[in-house]
């Protein structure tokens, strides 16, 4: 059974920082397979569709949507089956529920973690 558990969200003022973490477990991530998976962070703002914001390939290469480029940094720890997202210079438009998943995403999604950027 696949499990994706996101954590680290919260309320932060504009210009602040947050660090999100995602723990992946289950058959498709076991036996060293996680390191070969392309992983991504997605977000879904109120009234909007879920979008991918940051991707990390098995090689460590990263991609970002233009809206977060230069402010967000995705990383992975293959020994721990975790993916992280460091978010700096946060803006109110970054407010959303953040999820991690493979890229492309599986049918299964975790609960996500809510990030609220507000003064």
Image (tube, grey):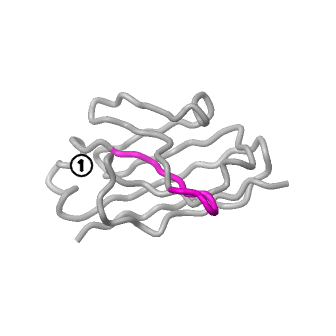
x then y, percent, for residue 26 = 23, 65
Q: Quadrant of residue 115?
A: bottom right
Q: Quadrant of residue 78?
A: top left
Residue name at image x 33 percent, y 58 percent: 24
Label 1: how many residues lie within 10 Å, few (<14), some (14-19) or many (20+)? many
Residue name at image x 54 percent, y 52 percent: 20
SS assignment at label 1:
helix
Along the line of sight, the residue nearer the viewer: 105 or 115: 105
Q: Which residue is mark 1?
A: 34
x then y, percent, for residue 45 = 61, 57
Q: Is residue 110 magenta?
A: no
Give the magenta part as a residue range. Answer: 39-49
Q: Is residue 45 magenta?
A: yes
x then y, percent, for residue 42 = 48, 51
* Residue 18 placement, left or right of 35: right
Residue name at image x 40 percent, y 46 percent: 40
Circle count = 1
Can you name the residue that lies furthest to the left here?
31
* Residue 60 placement, left or right of 21: left
Image vertical order of residue 62 relative to residue 95, above or below: above
Can you name the residue that lies furthest to the right here?
119
Residue name at image x 28 percent, y 29 percent: 59
Image vertical order of residue 33 relative to residue 10, above or below: above
x then y, percent, for residue 11 = 72, 60
The N terminus, quarter of image: bottom left
The C terminus, quarter of image: bottom right
């Amino acid at each position: 059974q696949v499990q994706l558990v996101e954590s680290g969200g919260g309320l932060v003022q504009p210009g602040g920082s947050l660090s999100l973490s995602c723990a992946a477990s289950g058959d498709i991530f076991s036996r060293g397979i996680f390191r070969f998976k392309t992983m991504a962070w997605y977000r879904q703002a109120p009234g909007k569709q879920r979008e991918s914001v940051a991707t990390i390939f098995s090689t460590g290469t990263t991609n970002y949507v233009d809206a977060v480029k230069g402010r967000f940094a995705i990383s992975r720890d293959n020994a721990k089956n975790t993916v992280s997202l460091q978010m700096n210079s946060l803006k109110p438009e970054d407010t959303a529920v953040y999820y991690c998943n493979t890229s492309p995403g599986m049918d299964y999604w975790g609960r996500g973690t809510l990030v609220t950027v507000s003064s």
